[in-house]
Image (cartoon, coloured by chain):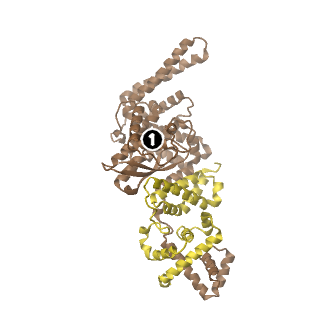
Chain colours: A brown, B yellow
């Protein structure tokens, strides 16, 4: 009789949508009515079969990838820490390097990116010093000259300002010159050793993160801390197979002044470098990086330009390009999200690597790339015709080593690369 | 965010377990591509990480599905523009991945036939219920329809499927 009404009630009953009173009503009605009982059974069976047929429940392919899930969890846990860190833009490229070292599945690819991308890392590089054993002492000297020469000159300046401006002015200029000289020299010397510097920077960055977290007090997430420490251990192990007695407390602290920042970084960098110098692994994947002695920033930029002009298609991602702001390390604060220029630049740095994956094939491979707020590539996977192919996977590995500026939001981009 | 990170992380983890698959299926229906769908869903959850839990919690399903849908539509639009999605998703609305469902083919075919005769609203509600295992209330949130409407849609769809299965001998056979 009231079949539709009954069906609706029965359906709700089958699906567990009724409250206790309604349930009882249905059960009472069903008990006294054989046809209703049959109707209920049919609906129950139909619901079961439907659930089964539609493949409800656990379909592994309908889940995020492990990397994606990990990123979500990291974000879920780390929003507090991330917010703290995001204000420290001075370290943002270091942070990226840190994530690079740990997240890059294929280190040999990662190196190249570091190489290409180092243009934004001039300070880091200069403070880390060259890593060639022979040059090391020279660099240390230079750095210590900077340290000792600078301070005495400044002291008189402050105390006896009116005493002899000329002398002070000359001394200041000399100090500035020494600093510049150190920077230029170290950049020049470091041409062959970007990889080591990058690794040093990675370790410094990890130190920094750990120290930050320790400072964070109540908000410290033990898991995240553990993960960071593991990253640090990994980075150190990579750098040298020897035990390295790192002390997180020695990491550079806040550096409001450029000079201070440089010196603080240099101390860590030099220390790391020293440790590393004796144990440069012949297996180091970084060996592949270019050995050009040309100043790194120039090289990086020119390569980037070439890549951007050549194979990198415009990202379909953001609609409002603002290239000027996209240079890593130059921004005063952390962007809300990466813009087109940022993405192009980051992708451009790995374009040649991706191209090589094509092994002479022509066409384009589109990669879906998830970039975390820290600027690292969380996941990269080929889509379309290259999905699941060696070329696609190679390209994805290559892209994983791309780095981007820090931003407040993660970003997923589908980016086409020419092969 | 005043909330303790650990508590929020747990909350998000629960949401992830509960809604990950429905959302991926939802995104797949829009984009027609599993990879894209995963990206979309990851974005959705990353957005959830940044969201104010207090403002989202009481309508989490609706929030997630809305964010997911909008993101998926964005992605789809971009893909189209880039010429990578030439055709509309070839994947049937209620069978996200036919190839993987081969074992349930027979019943599935009957279910599909039944659903084909119904409206989009019926199909959507049915899918959210039997594929994604959402409750009426969640379906109501997600679709923006009243609970009564959801109940009617699902009942109508389920009865249609039942009738089709009966004709196909499925129900008789199983009983």
| Quadrant in which the N terminus of chain A appears | bottom right
Count of numbered circles on the image = 1
Is residue B67 shown to the viewer in this render? Answer: yes
Q: Position of residue B57 (x, y in %)?
A: 64, 58
Which residue corresponds to the image point at 44% horizontal and 35% vertical from the top-left?
A119
Image mark 1: chain = A
Q: Residues within 10 Å of mark 1 (few under 14, many from 20)?
A: many
* Quadrant in which residue B134 is drawn: bottom right
Q: Is residue A44 left or right of residue A352?
A: right
The residue shown at (54%, 21%) is A151
In the displayed structure, A195 sits above or below B17; it is: above
- Is B167 drawn above or below residue A19 in the view shown? below
Query: Vertically, is A330 above or below A9?
Result: above
Instruction: Give the percent coordinates (x, y) of residue B67.
Output: 57, 57
Q: Looking at the image, which is closer to me, A327 or A188?
A: A327
State the residue lying farthest toward the left: A360
Which is more toward the observer, B90 or A329?
Answer: B90
Spot the residue most to the right: A21
- Mark 1 highlights which residue? A345
Q: Give the answer, above or below, for where A153 lies relative to B9.
A: above
Q: Which x, y percent locates residue B78?
A: 48, 53
Residue A241 shows in the view: no
In the image, taking residue A248 as reference, residue A356 lies left or right, namely left
Instruction: Report x, y in % for residue B160.
Output: 54, 78
Q: Residue at x 49, y 44 (%)?
A: A340
**Residue at screen point 41% across, 49% down:** A416
User: Element under label 1?
Assistant: helix
């Amino acid at each position: 009789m009231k079949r539709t009404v009954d069906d609706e009630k029965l359906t709700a009953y089958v699906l567990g949508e009724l409250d206790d009173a309604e349930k009882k009503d249905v059960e009472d009605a069903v008990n006294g009515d054989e046809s209703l009982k049959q109707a209920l059974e049919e609906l129950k069976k139909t619901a079961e079969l439907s659930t089964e047929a539609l493949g409800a429940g656990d379909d592994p392919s309908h889940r995020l990838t492990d990397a994606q899930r990990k990123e979500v969890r990291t974000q879920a846990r780390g929003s507090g820490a991330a917010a703290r860190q995001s204000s420290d833009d001075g370290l943002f490229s270091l942070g990226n390097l840190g994530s690079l070292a740990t997240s890059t599945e294929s280190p040999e690819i990662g190196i190249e990116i570091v190489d290409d991308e180092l243009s934004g890392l001039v300070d880091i590089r200069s403070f880390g010093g060259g890593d060639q054993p022979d040059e090391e002492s020279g660099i240390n000297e230079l750095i210590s000259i900077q340290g000792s020469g600078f301070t005495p000159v400044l002291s008189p300046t402050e105390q006896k300002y009116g005493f002899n401006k000329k002398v002070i002015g000359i001394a200041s200029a000399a100090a500035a010159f020494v600093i510049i000289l150190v920077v230029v020299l170290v950049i020049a010397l470091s041409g062959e050793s970007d990889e080591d510097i990058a690794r040093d920077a990675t370790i410094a960055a990890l130190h920094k993160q750990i120290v930050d977290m320790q400072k964070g007090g109540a908000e410290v997430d033990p898991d995240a801390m553990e993960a960071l420490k593991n990253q640090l251990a990994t980075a150190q192990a990579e750098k040298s197979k020897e035990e390295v007695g790192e002390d997180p407390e020695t990491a550079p602290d806040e550096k409001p002044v450029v000079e201070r920042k440089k010196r603080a970084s240099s101390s860590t960098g030099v220390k790391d470098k020293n440790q590393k110098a004796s144990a440069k692994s012949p297996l180091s994947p970084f060996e592949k990086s270019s050995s050009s002695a040309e100043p790194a920033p120039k090289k990086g930029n020119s390569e980037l330009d070439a890549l951007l002009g050549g194979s990198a298609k415009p990202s379909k991602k953001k609609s409002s390009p603002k290239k000027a702001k996209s240079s890593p390390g130059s921004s005063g604060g952390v962007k809300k999200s990466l813009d087109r220029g940022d993405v192009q630049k980051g992708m451009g740095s790995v374009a040649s690597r991706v191209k090589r994956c094509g092994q002479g094939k022509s066409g384009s491979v589109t990669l879906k790339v998830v970039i975390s707020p820290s600027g690292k590539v969380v996941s990269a996977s080929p889509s379309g015709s290259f999905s699941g192919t060696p070329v696609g996977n190679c390209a994805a590995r290559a892209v994983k080593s791309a780095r981007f500026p820090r931003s407040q939001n993660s970003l997923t981009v589908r980016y086409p690369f020419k092969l | 965010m005043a909330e303790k990170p650990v508590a929020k992380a747990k909350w998000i983890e629960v949401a992830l377990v509960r809604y990950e698959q429905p959302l991926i299926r939802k995104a797949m229906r829009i984009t027609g591509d599993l990879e894209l769908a995963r990206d979309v869903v990851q974005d959705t959850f990353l957005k959830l990480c940044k969201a104010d839990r207090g403002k989202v919690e009481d309508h989490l399903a609706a929030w997630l599905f809305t964010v997911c849908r909008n993101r998926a539509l964005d992605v789809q639009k971009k893909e189209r523009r880039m010429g990578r999605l030439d055709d509309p998703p070839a994947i049937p609305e209620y069978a996200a991945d036919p190839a993987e469902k081969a074992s349930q083919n027979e019943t599935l075919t009957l279910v599909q036939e039944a659903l084909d005769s119904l409206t989009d609203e019926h199909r959507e509600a049915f899918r959210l219920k039997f594929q994604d295992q959402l409750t009426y209330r969640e379906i109501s949130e997600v679709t923006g329809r009243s609970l009564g409407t959801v109940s009617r849609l699902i009942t109508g769809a389920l009865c249609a499927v039942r009738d089709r299965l009966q004709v196909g001998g499925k129900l008789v056979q199983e009983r």
